[in-house]
Image (cartoon, rainbow, N blue to C red):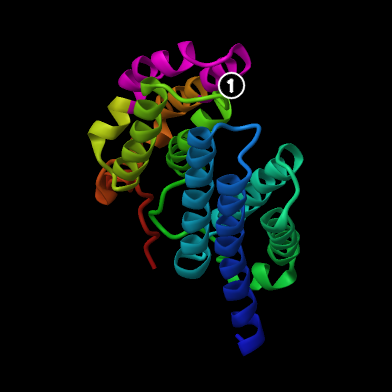
Amino acid sequence: MSTVNRAAPMLVAAAIVLLAVAWSLQLAVAPEPFSPGAGAVVATGLSLYALVATGGILIARGRWSARLGFVVVAGSLGLAVVTEPGLWYAVGLTLSAACLVGLAGPWMGSWLRKLPVAGGPGAIPVVLALGSLGLVAAVGVASPDGLGAGHGVLGGAGVLLAWAYARAQLWALWALRLVLPAIAAAAIAGSPWPGGLMLTAIVATLVAMAWRREARLAVQPLPDRLPSPRSRPAKAEP
């Protein structure tokens, strides 16, 4: 791979991090229509996604990382719609446009893996972990006028469950299945109805995915995910 083809994804990854920094500063100086607390939580969620996408692009080189990068860009463009223009607004919008072009460029196709890693998680576990992490920004969007204790608990639980599930902890899967709805109840009740409806939809989707067979297989040891020797077709005699 040429030096140019290697440099381009690195520049894209750096631009994603800078994008998150710029929009975090925008929310710090001009958070309206978010309260300062809600703005800080949204900025934290956007930054977490940016860091995960950057690590995925540079280290894992999985195609999911580019898709997550597009999610970060989409979230930043949403902030561009609702927040007031200013210096960091202009910087963030410029970086958002640069990331959009960079992620869509042909260099990403040659850099990212074309096939998933053998024995790696499928789409459902990846979306489940990233969706849990997304609860951080979701609580800020759901209650822009101010956050209650329930919102903090749900956002913190999202980070913990995303981390534990990504590390194949079985208890995290059962917490996503059974505990997450109970944790989310207070945040849903303490949000305006549009935000409560949004949180309900997100949590219901995460719980439904947690009950999928693919989600369970992701927390099993690798030998348990592979077919047993008896189930493999026998080799033909020469």
Q: Position of residue 175 (x, y in %)?
A: 29, 26
Q: Residue at x 65, y 77 (%)?
A: 8
Q: How many marks?
A: 1
Q: Is residue 104 above or below residue 184?
A: below
Is 225 placed left or right of 62 in the picture? left
Q: Residues within 10 Å of mark 1 (few under 14, many from 20)?
A: some
Q: Is residue 185 magenta?
A: yes
What's the magenta region?
Answer: 176-202
Q: Position of residue 162 (x, y in %)?
A: 37, 40
**Residue 171 picture quarter:** top left
Q: Which residue lies under the disc numbered 1?
A: 198
Residue 63 seen anywhere in this rendered image of the structure: no
Q: Quadrant of the N terminus?
A: bottom right
Q: Position of residue 21 (x, y in %)?
A: 55, 58
Q: Secondary structure at mark 1?
A: helix
Q: Amino acid at mark 1?
A: Met
Residue 149 seen anywhere in this rendered image of the structure: yes
| Residue closest to the eye, 74 or 104 | 74
Q: Position of residue 82 (x, y in %)?
A: 72, 37
Q: Residue at x 72, y 46 (%)?
A: 77
Farthest residue to the bottom: give it: 3
Q: Residue at x 58, y 15 (%)?
A: 197
Q: Quadrant of the C terminus?
A: bottom left
Q: Is residue 18 above or below residue 183?
A: below
Is 173 placed left or right of 171 in the picture? right
